[in-house]
Image (spheres, rainbow, N blue to C red):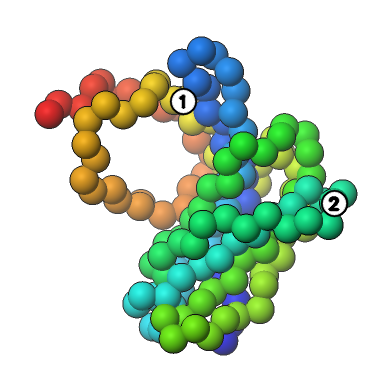
Amino acid sequence: MSPPQSLAVGTAVSTTAAGDLVYSIVVSWAEAVNALVLNDGAYELRYKRSASGVWQPTARYDGSATRAVIAGVDYGVQYDIEVRAITYVGGQSNWEPIEGYTVGSSTAGVTEINDFGPVTETVTTTKDLGAVTDTVTETLDGGPVAA
């Protein structure tokens, strides 16, 4: 089975309500072509500081996903990241590596996400519009969610 294709990586910066910056790595890949991954399969990611040998797992992502976020990383630090596909019957691809990515040196165009505080209403649906393929230069806040 083929590993995930067209990997891209970038840095997202969240600003908390208190004004603190929180850095995340955004990893994206092409949609699965293997039906056993796309339908009820999954993706696994793991990451580590390039200077250390200890891999940290992340949550599994649905087989229809095309991106993942690794939160709480340190600005200016190099990380190694690996992604693999898993079929719904348990088959696994080889790990596809991204080596030596420095947080803050975005290659996926994601540079800032503003956090305007916790969600206080119930969220029942989400929509993934796919990977960012260009530089995000402006974010508009449409106001609060109406119940």
Is residue 128 something one can see in this rendering? yes
Residue at (24, 40) in percent of width and height: 123
Towards the viewer: 28 or 22: 22
Compared across the picture, whether 141 is left or right of 11 comes to left
**Residue where numbered disc 2 is placed:** 52
Left or right of residue 117: residue 53: right
- From the top left corner, tell me how far across and down residue 36 is, in percent: 41, 83
**Which x, y percent locates residue 45?**
60, 61
Residue 4 picture quarter? bottom right
Q: Earlier in the sequence, mark 1 or mark 2?
A: 2
Circle nearer the viewer, 1 or 2: 2
Going by the image, does 99 lie left or right of 109?
Answer: right
- Marker count (numbered): 2
81 relative to 51, above or below: below
x then y, percent, for residue 140: 36, 25
Residue type (three-letter) at the residue carrying disc 2 = Ser
